[in-house]
Image (cartoon, rainbow, N blue to C red):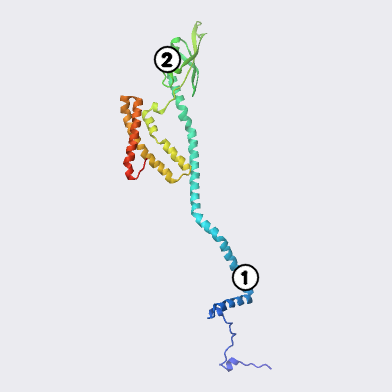
Amino acid sequence: MRINYNFAFKNSKLTPWERPAPPNLLISDASLKKKISYLIEQTKSNKQVIYPSLFILLSSLGIQFLTFFPNRAIKSLETDHFQYQVVSQKLSDLESSKNRFRKKIKNIDKYFTQATTSYLFAFYLQNSVPKGVQLNSYSFSDNGFDIVATAFNLDALNEFITLIVESPVILKDSVSINQVNRKDFAKSNNSDPVPDYEMEIYGAIKKLEVAKRNDKLGGLIGALPLVTIMALFWLYFERQSDEKITNHAWYTFWYVIPTLPMFLAFPFMYKVTGFWLSLLICIVITGLSFLLLAFIVKPFGINLL
């Protein structure tokens, strides 16, 4: 027989029973030794819960320890690596620019080395052919020229030789006549033979220099600091320090100043004393100017000696 009885309703003083929780020594006032013993016991009694978590924790700590020093090294080299990438890119761009510049120079080099002399020779040769002279062939090279011409009379031939010798691009002492041949042939409207002279003449060409053609342009090119610019390029491409490159430019500036007085004194002294004595005096002036400049700038911390 089933009896329906509600204890909570019949007796309101009844309270539900709750299972007491095991004592937690970690939050109690127990000693440290007891707390450690308690942790060991809990670990042994709850292996399925503690061991996987403990394994993951220890593995993470081990990985962090193994990667600590490599990550530290990577962090310390990160700035240097970035600078290396920047410098490498600049060097790559500079190499490309240098190759393009070298290619352009190679393409126009012939216009400054070969074409100028050959053009001047052809120009003066055209003006050196008088009436009655015909050029059969001519060749030109760095070693000299060779011309084969024909003339209908000796006067025209002599005039042609004179104009060749007096040409400003030909060395007078080098002009030589290889051979002169006389031939006879008939004109189309006359059966009488007409003398025809064939001559081969050769000689050497002057080495044309800018200073000889234009005094101002030659002086400008001579004043350009080409050696200093080449030295700066050389120091840069050899990866020399910035201090060494700047010091080279700095001292070059001070070393150029003592050389300026000789360029003012030489033109006046040349007219009076001649070339060699003027040059010797200018060298002495340059040396004294250098010593004087070194003495003047030394109190300012600039040591030139």
Question: Against 61, is 136 above or below?
Answer: above
**Residue 25, quarter of picture:** bottom right
Considering the image in quadrants, where does the N terminus appear? bottom right
Nearer the viewer's eye, disc 2 or disc 1?
Answer: 1
Residue drawn at the location 50% of the way across and 42% of the way down: 95
Could you tell me residue 110's position as x and y percent?
Answer: 48, 30
Q: CA distance from mark 2 to mark 1?
A: 113 Å
Residues under numbered marks 2 and 1 in contact, where contact means CB atoms less than 8 Å apart: no
Residue drawn at the location 31% of the way across and 27% of the way down: 269
- Residue 238 as seen in the image, left or right of residue 277: right
Could you tell me residue 85's position as x and y percent?
Answer: 50, 50
* Residue nearest the viewer, comparing 268 with 183: 268
Q: Which residue is mark 1?
A: 52
Secondary element under disc 1, as helix, strand or loop, is: helix
Q: Amino acid at mark 1?
A: Pro
Question: Against 247, is 180 above or below?
Answer: above
Residue drawn at the location 31% of the way across and 41% of the way down: 296
Could you tell me residue 274's position as x and y percent?
Answer: 33, 24
Question: Against 129, is 214 above or below?
Answer: below
Could you tell me residue 191's position as x and y percent?
Answer: 51, 5
Badge 2: few (under 14), some or many (20 or more) residues near its Cα, within 10 Å? few
Q: Which residue is mark 2?
A: 162
* Residue nearest the viewer, comparing 159 with 211: 211
Work out whether mark 2 precedes mark 1 in sequence or the reverse, and give the earlier one: 1
